[in-house]
Image (cartoon, helix red, strand yellow):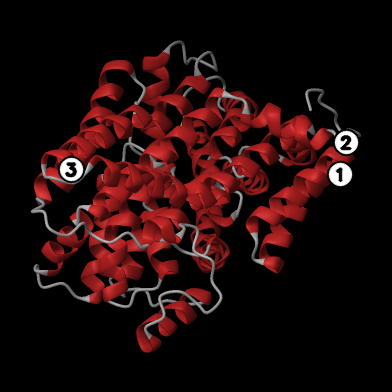
Amino acid sequence: MEETVAVGAWSLLPAAVAIILAFVTRNTVFSLAVACLVGVFIAGEGLMGFPNLLKNALGTTAFSWIFLLELFIGVTIAFFQRTGAIRNFSAWVESCNMTRVRVQLSAWVMGMFVFFSDYFSPLFVGSTMRTLSDRFRISREKLAYIADSTSAPVSVIVPITGWAVFIAGLMIGMGPIADDADAMRVFINAIPYNIYAILAVVMVGAIAARIIPEFGPMKTAETRAENEGKVLRDGAQPLMSRELTDIEPFEGIRTSLFWNFVLPVLIVIGVGIGSFVVTKSALTMEAFLLSSVVAATVMRIQGVPLADIMETAMNGIKGVMPAIIILAFAYALNELSANLHTAEFIVAQTEGWLTPGLLPALTFLIAGIIAFSTGTSWGTFAIMMPIAVPLAFTFSGQELSPVVYATVAAIAGGGVFGDHCSPLSDTSILASTGAASDHIDHIKTQMPYAMVVGGISVAAYLVLGAMF
């Protein structure tokens, strides 16, 4: 499907079908596939439009990158489990006089610490804390929420991440923003106005510490886990397959927490942050490739047979395939939404309402709707920045002012808000994968929390807007 066609309100139908079917059937793959099929018919492509859509959407560098990243992460996690590294890490953490609350707070802090990659963070937090959280009867839905809400919200408010560089790059040439240095200064000044991202992270800590009690579907999930010992509901379909979650430690060798766990993690973090400092782009996939090679080498030196290492690696790849399949269809639906001009239709229906006082609040809501409908926050940024930021400069007389900073922050926070509510979101899919949670259960339990923070954010932007 290469041609683009504007079909007005019909462009909303594929995303609507995907979201409604996902909640009704609890089968994300089926829902996305049906949505893509509906979309190609709306575009007038017929049945052949479906395979053409998949070829165009998946035959890209962007999808190849996340595909390889997922594979190497799966291999790394498999090595962690085969060497007993996660078991050893869990035992070490548990020796620190852990409680149910402290386990959740540890996951919260860990998510904020791994700030440089929104893809690595939820997978790392979920996979490393899962054994411990299961032991303390914390629901997989809760673990997925902690992992999800400490990944993108942190990445979008830290200036030394790919998110910051991407958002800043979109602003160059707008108003008085002449170069990347000017754009980064605007991004930094906008951070205090990113109400959703800041409150989302704070709320995770407050929920984990029981300062704010659980409510909605999450309360049901936590009651089930704590009272019945069921970290997953009956009939749940964990997004990480058993080939990965059921790997047992290799017996007969002496493993090391440092060599089998800490060193591979340090390689990922070191290469990720180091490459970002040098090239302004975090080489996350390459970091996991190097980490996997080093981990395999250490295993061989410790006496694990080569055949066992390769079998473990293959089990790791098999384990992440459910997530990869969902990501593939999500990418196809994103391509379809772009071809049908879904975002442009949403913006066209709302841009006439914008005034200086309403601009941040409406920008936040529009960005949230686009991200919810397409499952991509970065795509939302690319669409909304060229529309809303120049409008903010028009209202401010081409000067940098609070209305500009609030608008930039509203776009960034709105994109993350929409992602947190959408079953199509790649970061939410990865959070479900890391926690081995049922993906729809994760979205259903996380959405009320996201909606509360989103509602507070809109109210705050309205108050700010009244001061402009």
Residue 437, image x, y percentages: 46, 64
Look at label 1 and name its amino acid. Trp
Name the quadrant of the N terminus.
top right
Select label 1 or label 3 by which is in front: 3
Q: Which residue is mark 2?
A: 7
> How would you rate the neighbour count of disc 2 (Cα within 10 Å): few for under 14, some for 14-19, many for 20 or more?
some
- Residue 247, above or below 339: below
| Residue appearing at x 69%, y 29% in the figure | 55
Pick whichever, 59 or 418, lies toward us: 59
Work out how far the residue at label 2 is from the one at label 1, CA to CA, in angstroms: 6 Å
Label for residue 10? 1
- Residue 94, above or below 43: below
Q: Are marks 2 and 1 in contact (CB under 8 Å)?
A: yes
| Residue appearing at x 52%, y 77% in the figure | 216
Helix, strand or loop for disc 3: helix
Look at label 2 and name its amino acid. Val
In the displayed orientation, state which residue is furthest to the bottom: 227
Residue 83, image x, y percentages: 20, 52
Q: Are marks 3 and 2 in contact (CB under 8 Å)?
A: no
Look at label 3 and name its amino acid. Met
Helix, strand or loop for disc 1: helix
Residue 418, image x, y percentages: 58, 49
Q: Earlier in the sequence, mark 1 or mark 3?
A: 1
**Residue 40 located left or right of residue 31:** right
Q: Quadrant of residue 327?
A: top right
Q: Which residue is mark 3?
A: 299
Q: Are marks 1 and 3 in contact (CB under 8 Å)?
A: no
